Image (spheres, rainbow, N blue to C red):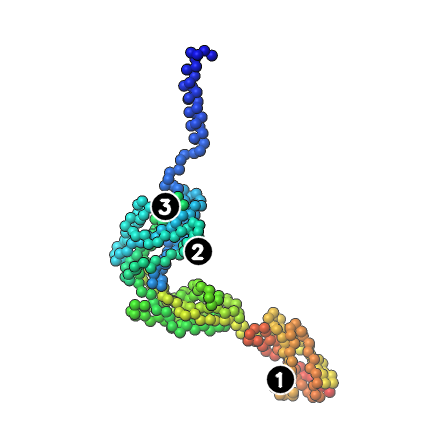
Amino acid sequence: MSAARRPALAPVLVALLLLVALGACGRKGPPVAPERRVPSPVSDLSGTVREGGVELSWSVPRRRVDNTRLLDLGVARVFRTDDAGQGDPKPALLSHDRVAGYTEVGTVQLGDPPSPQMQGNRVVFSDHRNLTVGRRYTYVVVTADALGRTSPPSARLSLTFAAGPEPPTDLQAVPGERQVRLSWQPSARFIDSSPVPGPLVYEVLRAPTADAPLAPIARTAPGVTTMTDRGLENERAYHYAVRAVRQEGSTQIEGEPTARVVGTPTDVTAPAPAAELVAIPSQDTVRLSWTPSPDADVAAHVVYRATGGGPFTRVGSVRAPGTTFTDRDVPPGTYRYAVTAQDASVRANESARSNEVDVTVP
């Protein structure tokens, strides 16, 4: 190739290299807009006025707005504004990672190590900062990933801060068969000493041990001051408390719970009786046999004897599954025998008597 032709090839080579480079870029796909990489907004912000503050709760978003998985969790930030409660609350608009016109009242670490407010995939956040009775407080939450990319604000949540009810009084727990019946006297005043104007809802709380945290298990209809907790385990202690709930518009204000009381369900049902009792007398002895009670919790069968028309007296027992008994040193005479079944409960419930048999000891 002559020197004169070499310069002519340079533009062709440059064009080929550009085409290769453009083809490689095309295989990577179009670039993703930065706003598509931010975390999805919190979608289930909820709250309750409780114990002199506002308790908020929400689920941690696990995807971005482009529906890709969010692995690099960062923080959640809580913003608040307040007003007199007239009209719509202030709009929540994100401006430079803040919510315009709102005050930041807390930050929750979502990534490692997570803040104590993280409970599984939910956050429980309490706000006690300069709250004033009668004011409406509006909250929004934003989250940010580890690179600081901030989600849109959650939907606004507005709550009216008001005094909660005083605890109910005279909480009683009466145990029964696999159940505990609770009753209490209604709350008469709010903690600001103002009277309760109408019936309140009551929330029943339960814990499995004396030092375990209480958890809600049921709410009553307004004005109802009894509740029966069913489907429990017999001979196991359950710990209860009750609190009153005030409703102001869409805001629920929960009062302090009562002191705990203990209820221990117990077996009060007697087993089915034994049957087909047979007695064979001989000198000084009566041999007895029977068909056992069909109940699974029978611990023993109890043997009774009566002289003539007199009352029955217990003469012995046989641990289940035994079904025979020998009554020894029986003086000559005429006797009646019967057998009962006794269960293994604390109360040792005893069945009705089996069929009676008459014998004569020579």
- In this rendering, the answer to whether 185 lies above or below 104 is below
Residue linked to disc 1:
313
Tell me the amino acid under the disc marked 2. Gln
- In this rendering, the answer to whether 216 lies above or below 323 is above
Residue linked to disc 2:
119
- Comparing 354 with 346, the one in front is 346
Q: Secondary structure at mark 2?
A: strand
Give the image location of residue 109, x and y in percent: 40, 51
Residue 208 shown left or right of residue 34 in the figure: right
Q: Secondary structure at mark 1?
A: strand
Tell me the amino acid under the disc marked 1. Thr
Residue linked to disc 3:
150
Quadrant where the C terminus lies? bottom right
Give the image location of residue 177, x and y in percent: 51, 71
- In this rendering, the answer to whether 97 lies above or below 295 is above
Query: Which residue lies at the image location 59% right of the left edge and 74% below the top edge?
Result: 343
**Given contact means CB atoms under 8 Å apart, are the residues at marks 3 and 2 in contact?**
no
Tell me the amino acid under the disc marked 3. Thr
Crowding at label 1, few (<14), some or many (≥20) Cα neighbours within 10 Å?
Answer: few
